[in-house]
Amino acid sequence: MRTLVTGLLCVAMIALPAAAADKTHNANVTVVFDHLLPNVPGKSMRGVMVEYGPGGSNPSHMHPKSAFIYATVIEGSIKSQINDGEVKVYKTGENWSEVPGDHHRVSANASETEPAKLFAVFVVDTDETKLVYPDN
């Protein structure tokens, strides 16, 4: 039962705040799993599916300061910019990582006509209540 409750709470935690939802365009974010790391007290691993419709995007954002993220494109092409780095396009099978404190300035479908999906694995403090902090 604890796993079910944790999973349901995590789905609620990933939801973007109302102000950010207005800036989100044709995107859906779903927590797929949430597991405590038994050998790393206080840390959890969370899997997040991000699905973009054609031209879809999410607002510029950050993640919890404790979060290490490894993202893999599983369908289509994703446009991404971390911090002040170059805007890169990642295709199916390609990946990138984000370290604690990174600023995810661009997160979007690189196509205006085809959908795209990425799967992100977070290693984060278990007590984090949000996974996304949109810029104000």
Image: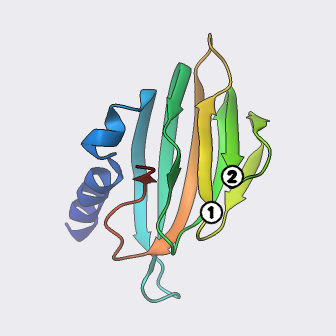
> Toward the viewer: 116 or 99?
99
Residue type (three-letter) at the residue carrying disc 1: Asp
Question: Mark 1, residues whose alpha carbon is within 10 Å: few (<14), some, or many (≥20)?
Answer: some
Viewer-proximal residue among 131 and 116: 131
Pinpoint residue 55: horizontal percent, then vertical percent.
57, 19
- Tell me if 101 is positioned left or right of 64 in this view: right
Left or right, residue 104 beside residue 89:
left
Q: Which residue is mark 1?
A: 102
Q: What kind of element bears circle 2?
A: strand
Dots 2, 1 in contact, CB < 8 A:
yes
User: Is 45 situated above or below 42?
Assistant: above
Lateral position of residue 4 relative to residue 122, left or right: left
Disc 2 residue type (three-letter): Ile
Residue tagged 2 = 82
Q: Is residue 84 above or below residue 69?
A: above
Q: Residue at x 49, y 36 (%)?
A: 58
